[in-house]
Image: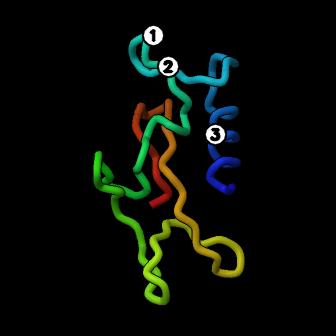
Amino acid sequence: MVISLASGLASVVTNPFSTGFFQLGQKASVIEASTACPGMFGSGASPGNTGKVLVDPLNGGAYNVVGLRGKKFLLPALWNPKTASCWTVM
């Protein structure tokens, strides 16, 4: 639920065309900013490699953000139109 909400907000905020989509390169490759970096969660991510994420020693779960009261989340990378690259919180 958190990822769905964050994806929706990111699409609205980063959408320069007011169409719900962001265009990368050619006109045929129209995608949402929040889906431009699939499977990327940390720095150094590449296809098949999630990148640098932290692992909770208590349950073995991966995370890259710590929220209120120590709650841990794994948030996906977002497309950054300024740098034309994927941005992660780590």
Name the N-terminal-most of marks 3 and 1.
Answer: 3
Amino acid carrying mark 2 in the image: Val
Q: Residue at x 63, y 21 (%)?
A: 16
Residue with the mark numbered 2: 30
- Residue 57 x, y percent position in the rendering: 44, 87
> Which element type, helix, strand or loop, lies under badge 2?
strand
Picture quadrant where residue 67 is located: bottom right
Residue with the mark numbered 1: 27
- Residue 76 x, y percent position in the rendering: 50, 52
Q: Residues within 10 Å of mark 1 (few under 14, many from 20)?
A: few
Amino acid carrying mark 1 in the image: Lys
Q: Residue at x 40, y 58 (%)?
A: 42
Q: Are marks 3 and 2 in contact (CB under 8 Å)?
A: no
Instruction: State the residue in front, 26 or 61.
Output: 61
Q: Are marks 1 and 2 in contact (CB under 8 Å)?
A: yes
- Residue 34 x, y percent position in the rendering: 55, 39
Amino acid carrying mark 3 in the image: Ala
Q: Residue furthest top?
A: 27
Picture quadrant where residue 51 is located: bottom left
Instruction: State the residue in front, 7 or 59.
Output: 59
Q: Is residue 31 above or below residue 1?
A: above
Q: How is the image coloured?
A: rainbow
Q: Residue at x 49, y 69 (%)?
A: 63
Q: Residues within 10 Å of mark 3 (few under 14, many from 20)?
A: some
Q: Residues within 10 Å of mark 2 (few under 14, many from 20)?
A: few
Number of numbered discs overlaid on the protein picture: 3
Left or right of 6? Residue 56 is: left
Q: Is residue 48 above or below residue 59?
A: above
Which mark, by number, is residue 10?
3
How many angstroms separate mark 3 from mark 1 (CA)?
21 Å
> Which element type, helix, strand or loop, lies under badge 1?
loop
